[in-house]
Image (cartoon, helix red, strand yellow):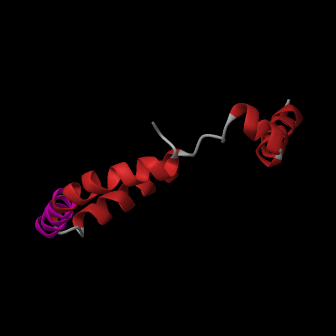
């Protein structure tokens, strides 16, 4: 009975190494400890983010995009002609 358990664990480790099995069945599920560590790592990253500064940068990007929009509208006919769209 104990030998059957060892055979099953050996089959699972071989299954992880086999590229065909990974392609067909996906990656093997992670253990609960790994998932907890991953969540803790993500929460630590979020704690270190300055949201006010992030929002300021997003606002700058949107303002730049709105400023460039007229330039792209003027250049679109030239790009359409170059790309062959009609």
Q: In the visual, does 26 lie left or right of 82? A: right
Would residue 62 be counted in the magenta stretch? yes
In this orientation, which residue lies closer to the viewer: 61 or 4? Answer: 61
The image shows residue 20 at horizontal and vertical percentages of 82, 39
Principal secondary structure, stretch drawn in magenta: helix
Q: Say which of 65 and 75 sits in front.
A: 75
Tell me what residue is drawn at x 18 percent, y 58 percent.
62
Residue 29 figure quarter: top right
Name the spot of residue 15 as percent of width and height, x first.
80, 40
**For the point 50% across and 45% down, which residue is it?**
32
Residue at image coords 22%, 61%: 68
Horizontal side of 8 relative to 27 (left or right) equals right
Residue 51 horizontal side relative to residue 79, left or right: left
Span of residues in magenta: 52-66
Query: Which residue does the image show at 81% across and 45% down from the upper left?
Result: 19
Quadrant location, the N terminus:
top right
- Would you place residue 69 above or below residue 53 in this image? above
């Amino acid at each position: 009975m104990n030998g059957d358990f060892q055979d099953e664990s050996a089959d699972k480790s071989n299954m992880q190494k086999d590229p065909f099995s990974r392609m067909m069945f996906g990656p093997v599920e992670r253990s609960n400890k790994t998932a907890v560590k991953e969540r803790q790592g993500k929460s630590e990253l979020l704690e270190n983010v300055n949201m006010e500064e992030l929002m300021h940068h997003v606002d700058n990007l949107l303002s730049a995009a709105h400023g460039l929009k007229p330039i792209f509208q003027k250049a679109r006919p030239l790009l359409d002609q170059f790309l062959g769209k009609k």
